[in-house]
Image: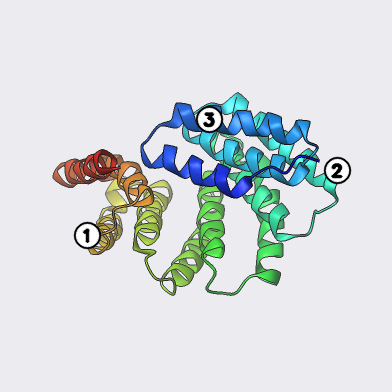
Amino acid sequence: MTQIPTQRIIEKLDNYLSKNDYSSAKDHLLYWLAESENASDNRAALLMCNELMGLTRKLGEGEEALGFVNKALTKIEEMNIQNNIGAATTYLNSATVYKAFGKAAEGIELFYKAKDIYEKNLAETDDRLGGLYNNMALSLVDLCRFGEANEFYQKALSVMRKVEGKEPEQAITYLNMASLVEAQFGLEDGEEKIAEYVKEAMQLLDISQNQSDGNYAFVCEKCASVFGYYGYFGYENELNERCRRIYERT
């Protein structure tokens, strides 16, 4: 069986993403998904499906993203790995795709499957738990389960505060919490709490602005429009400029 060079594939993918070159990143993953399937390397194919889920979700390609979800979940069954960490990550990614395309109710069970596996196998300071809790909360907001959503946002912050360099991820969670308040109470009644969370996010992004990798650029890009939505237009422009400088350097 041909060995699929997964480490080199991911390194090349990261290079494309650091340059915001999503088209090349997608072509790269599709090529290696086909190669993995031709080589009957299910583990490599599952990895490619997970990466393609995330990329097509980011690009707004719902039909393709959901197709990769179905393919990945099928591979988990075929490999009989339903209870390991790799399966949990796939459940998380799949549920996130469902949420992104208006199907939160279909994905929430997958979030809970991932939660059960992660909490049994990961340390409380593992940032994968933080990502899981944050994404679960987003879906719970869509389902109007606001109290549960807030609990998971607090869990996400608790994890990320213990992990060095995760200030950008904390900032995302605070902005998500602002959106939760808006969904639950409205902009007017929630104005004070929303402003508190937005300012917390701003401070965290400023603390971490010495980070110059693709992840920080992506966070700035993702958060900028949220600041603009809440009226912080100057800061929206500042984040877009930080993002531009990082991409130009890479």
Residue 245: image tag: none
**Which numbered circle lies on residue 206?**
1
Label 3 sits on residue: 26
The relative height of residue 73 versus residue 132 in the rendered view (above or below) is above
**Mark 2 and mark 1 residues within 8 Å of each other at the beta carbon:** no
**What is the crowding at mark 1: few (fewer than 14 residues within 10 Å), some, or many (at least 20)?**
some
Query: Can I make out residue 193 in this image?
Result: yes
Q: Which residue is mark 2?
A: 78
Residue 125 picture location, percent across and down: 52, 73
C-alpha gap between disc 2 and disc 3: 25 Å
Earlier sequence position, callout 2 versus callout 1: 2
Q: Amino acid at mark 2?
A: Glu
Quarter of the picture containing the N terminus is top right
Look at 70% across and 44% down and name the residue there. 44
Q: Residue at x 72, y 53 (%)?
A: 87
| Quadrant of the snapshot with the C terminus | top left
* Vertical order, 146 against 96 (above or below): below
Callout 2 touching callout 3 (CB < 8 Å): no
The residue that appears at 65% across and 53% down in the rendered structure is 89
Discs 2/3, front: 3
Position of residue 143 measured from the top left corner of the image (x, y, whole percent): 57, 45
Whether 228 is drawn above or below 30: the answer is below
Which mark is first along the chain, 1 or 3?
3
Using the numbered discs, state the Cα–Cα distance from disc 2 to disc 1 in whole angstroms.
46 Å
What's the residue at 27%, 48% (across, down)? 188
Q: CA distance from mark 3 to mark 1?
A: 32 Å
| Amino acid beneath label 3 | Lys
